[in-house]
Amino acid sequence: MAARKSQYISPAMWEAIRNEYITSDISTRDIAKKYGICVATVYKHSGKEKWVERRIEHERTVNEAVEQ
């Protein structure tokens, strides 16, 4: 089996991917599929940058704003 060629993803693209994850209900697997990125790479970034915690905080902020 041939090794998959790694793809460079710019910091700006990672920011867009991260923001999409945080502000939607898309899964990390679906993000990887959508952008053609290895799932492990997305998991690595999401863990390092605490995407899950940031999503929870974003949802909390939105819910509080809606309640007001």
Image (tube, helix red, strand yellow):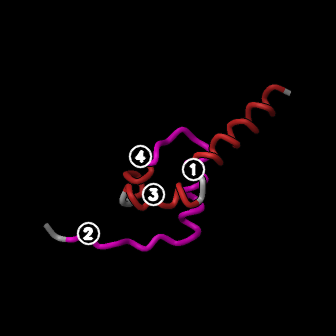
The amino acid pointed to by label 3 is: Val
* Region rendered in magenta: 3-28
Mark 3 or 1: the one toward you: 3
Does residue 46 sit above or below 53 in this rendering?
below
Q: Which of marks 3 and 4 is nearer the N terminus?
A: 4
Write down the quadrant of residue 7 in the picture.
bottom left
Q: Which residue is drawn at 57% across and 70% down?
A: 11
Residue underneath mark 1: 20
Mark 2 or 1: the one toward you: 2
Residue underneath mark 4: 30
Q: Please, what secondary structure does the residue beneath circle 4 have?
A: helix
| 66 relative to 32 in the view: left or right | right
Q: Earlier in the sequence, mark 1 or mark 4?
A: 1
Residue 4, disc: 2
Where in the figure is residue 61, as x and y percent of width and height?
76, 38
Residue underneath mark 3: 42
Q: Determine if the magenta segment contains residue 49.
A: no
| 63 relative to 38 in the view: left or right | right
Q: Earlier in the sequence, mark 3 or mark 1?
A: 1
The amino acid pointed to by label 4 is: Asp
Where in the figure is residue 25, as x and y percent of width and height?
54, 38
The amino acid pointed to by label 2 is: Arg
| 8 relative to 24 in the view: left or right | left
Q: Determine if the magenta segment contains residue 27.
A: yes
Q: Nearest the camera: 14 or 46?
A: 46
- Callout 4 crowding tier (Cα within 10 Å): few <14, some 14–19, many ≥20: some
Where in the figure is residue 6, as x and y percent of width and height?
34, 72
Q: Which of marks 3 and 2 is nearer the N terminus?
A: 2
Distance in Å between CA atoms under marks 2 and 1: 25 Å
